[in-house]
Image (cartoon, helix red, strand yellow):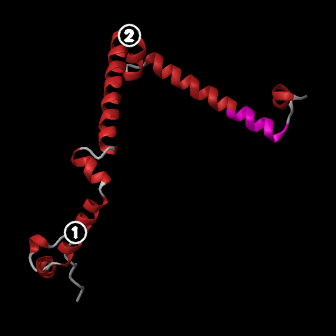
């Protein structure tokens, strides 16, 4: 009655729960293998077509290498994105610019007049009240 086999053979709530989980896992695995055996998706093609699988993996290797090189440059502060990511003064400047635009008199004027024209009105018109 000890060990995994002992736990499975006992009639306890834990063993029933374990059997239920095992049964569910086997059903899911059976469903997956059936779908793979009868399907025509990318995973089946990766498994069945060796040439295609090699080409996909080679492309994935190249893509990951290029992504690694790009992130190395970004982390080193190279290029526009690298400068934007690594230079906090650019973030502060952009944030200040957005704040200035929000506070500008032109934006305030636009907000004030936006509801006066039908093409600027985005909410549905109110229904007339019953007499």
- In the image, 61 versus 56, the foreground residue is 61
Answer left or right for 58 relative to 98: right
Q: Whole-percent x and y of residue 56?
A: 34, 20
Res. 68 image quadrant: top left
Residue 86 belongs to magenta span: no
| Residue, disc 1 | 98
| Residue, disc 2 | 50
Residue at 74% over, 35% down: 18
> For the magenta stretch, what is the residue range?
12-21
Q: Is most of the magenta stretch helix, strand or loop?
A: helix
Residue at 25% over, 60% down: 90
Secondary structure of residue under mark 2: helix
Residue at 31% over, 24% down: 62
Q: Which of marks 1 and 2 is in front?
A: 1
Residue 20 belongs to magenta span: yes
Answer left or right for 11 relative to 82: right
């Amino acid at each position: 009655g000890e060990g995994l086999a002992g736990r499975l053979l006992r009639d306890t709530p834990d063993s029933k729960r374990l059997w239920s989980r095992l049964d569910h896992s086997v059903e899911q695995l059976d469903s997956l293998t059936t779908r793979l055996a009868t399907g025509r998706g990318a995973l089946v093609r990766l498994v069945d077509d060796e040439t295609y699988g090699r080409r996909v993996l080679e492309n994935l290797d190249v893509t990951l290498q290029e992504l690694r090189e790009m992130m190395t440059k970004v982390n080193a502060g190279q290029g526009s994105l690298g400068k934007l990511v690594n230079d906090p003064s650019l973030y502060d400047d952009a944030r200040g610019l957005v704040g200035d635009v929000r506070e500008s008199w032109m934006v305030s004027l636009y907000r004030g007049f936006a509801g006066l024209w039908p093409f600027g009105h985005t909410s549905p018109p109110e229904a007339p009240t019953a007499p």
